[in-house]
Image (cartoon, grey):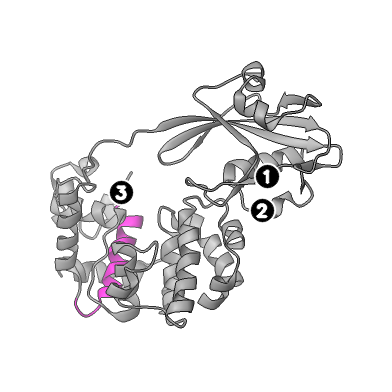
């Protein structure tokens, strides 16, 4: 039995029972694929159910305010996915009359859809012979065939796509794509792969050469940027605060408290003398106190954020208009949400 047939046979007998595998509806499969970009299945599954319940069709998603979509996405990270999801839903409804595209060439035009997602949807929904290549596929192919080209290099991306395309089953491309992804996710895992129970162990290059831990190869590690955030959390006698909507960055269109970013961790004295603080707190009628004495890093893929939350008690003002009683309805980064929950219950 060849590589492709072995994987398909294994998949049909061992696949996980996931809701998007019980349908050929491109909307459902698109939604699942966008959620699972940079997200593991066990983390993404509750979000999939929430979105399907709230937006059962592409029309429901398209007519929803972006703020509602972001709020539902809250905690999942990589928020550009949610913004692109909403944008593409409106494009499909308004420009394609609600007809969800199912061919690779049409799907790749959607915002937030790349080669992998377009290939997955086209093969599953349209039986199109276009191979998926994601982290799971890179890992499996690199180990099995002994490919030492860096998976994050231009050459590697091209070579692995060609290899996957050569291997894909012509009659069942969608099943093959799901099989290769599932095998990489559950058997040929990044750490502690299940080599002893692997159906491909007798012909796996990496296992035979004792190089499983060396593959796949990646170029240079990502440089992690360290950032220091100082949030000003206003609280008036009538329980009001200030929220601002971000206009750029990874948290674009999410809400936050007024933010002062510094090059290093600062104390109260440096904060109250900071020029941005003086712009925001232009009144002397306030007291300030640090809420979190221990500052732990909030770790994102490319950056670690050290955040301090400074409680600013002050008088009422027209500029301080957000009620603490309704603050949780706004979409915020997980970092802010964790603080709000702790602060409200303090």
Which residue bears the numbered disc 2? Answer: 330
Image quadrant containing the N terminus: bottom left
The rendered magenta stretch, by its main secondary structure, is classed as helix
Which structural element holds mark 3?
loop
Q: Is residue 213 found left or right of 88 in the rendered image? A: left
Alpha-carbon span between mark 2 and mark 1: 9 Å
Instruction: Give the mark nearer the N terminus: 2 vs 1.
Output: 1
Is residue 178 part of the magenta span, yes or no?
Answer: yes
Using the image as rendered, state which of residue 58 and residue 22 is in the foreground.
58
**Residue 57 seen in this snapshot:** no
Residue 310 vs 320, above or below: the answer is above
Highlighted magenta segment, given as a residue range: 170-189
The structure residue drawn at horizontal position 66% and vertical position 53%, both measured from the top left corner, is: 330
Whether pointer 2 and pointer 1 mark residues with C-beta atoms closer than 8 Å, the reply is yes
Q: Which mark is residue 193?
A: 3
Q: Nearer the viewer, mark 2 or mark 1?
A: 1
Which residue is more in the foreground, 346 or 40?
A: 346
- Residue found at x 42% / y 80%: 96
| C-beta proximity under 8 Å, tags 3 and 2 | no
Residue 125 in the image: above or below residue 278? below
User: Which image quarter: residue 338?
Assistant: top right
**Alpha carbon separation for disc pair 1 and 3:** 46 Å
- Above or below residue 154? Residue 259 is above
**Can residue 7 be seen at all in this image of the molecule?**
yes
Q: Which mark is residue 189?
A: none
Q: Is residue 311 left or right of residue 184?
A: right
Percent position of residue 224, x then y: 39, 33
Quarter holding the C terminus?
Answer: top right
Residue 147 placement (x, y as % from top left): 14, 50
Specify the label residue 243 is tagged with: 1
């Amino acid at each position: 039995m060849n590589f492709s047939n072995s994987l398909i046979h294994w998949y049909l007998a061992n696949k996980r029972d996931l809701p998007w595998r019980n349908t050929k509806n491109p909307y459902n499969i698109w939604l699942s694929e966008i959620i699972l970009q940079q997200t593991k299945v066990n983390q993404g599954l509750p979000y999939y159910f929430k979105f399907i319940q709230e937006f059962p069709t592409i029309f429901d998603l398209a007519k929803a305010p972006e703020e509602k979509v972001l709020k539902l996405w809250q905690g999942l990270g990589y928020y550009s996915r949610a913004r692109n999801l909403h944008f593409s839903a409106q494009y499909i409804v308004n420009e394609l009359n609600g007809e969800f595209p199912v061919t690779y060439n049409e799907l790749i035009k959607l915002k937030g859809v790349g080669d992998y997602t377009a290939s997955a949807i086209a093969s599953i929904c349209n039986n199109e012979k276009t191979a998926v290549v994601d982290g799971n596929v890179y890992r499996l192919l690199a180990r099995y065939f002994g490919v030492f080209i860096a998976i994050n290099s231009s050459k590697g991306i091209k070579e692995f796509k060609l290899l996957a395309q050569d291997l894909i089953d012509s009659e069942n491309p969608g099943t093959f794509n799901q099989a290769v992804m599932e095998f990489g996710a559950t058997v040929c895992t990044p750490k502690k792969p299940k080599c002893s129970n692997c159906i491909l162990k007798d012909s796996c290059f990496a296992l035979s050469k004792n190089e499983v831990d060396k593959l796949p190869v990646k170029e240079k590690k990502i440089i992690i940027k360290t950032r220091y955030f100082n949030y000003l959390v206003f609280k008036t006698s009538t329980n009001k605060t200030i929220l601002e909507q971000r206009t750029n960055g990874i948290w674009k269109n999410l809400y936050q408290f007024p933010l002062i970013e510094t090059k290093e961790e600062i104390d109260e004295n440096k904060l109250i003398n900071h020029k941005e603080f003086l712009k925001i707190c232009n009144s002397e009628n306030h007291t300030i106190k640090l809420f979190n004495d221990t500052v732990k890093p909030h770790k994102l893929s490319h950056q670690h954020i050290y955040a301090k939350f400074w409680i600013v008690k002050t008088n009422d003002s027209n500029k301080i208009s957000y009620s603490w009683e309704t603050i949780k309805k706004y979409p915020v980064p997980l970092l802010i949400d964790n603080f709000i929950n702790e602060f409200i219950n303090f």
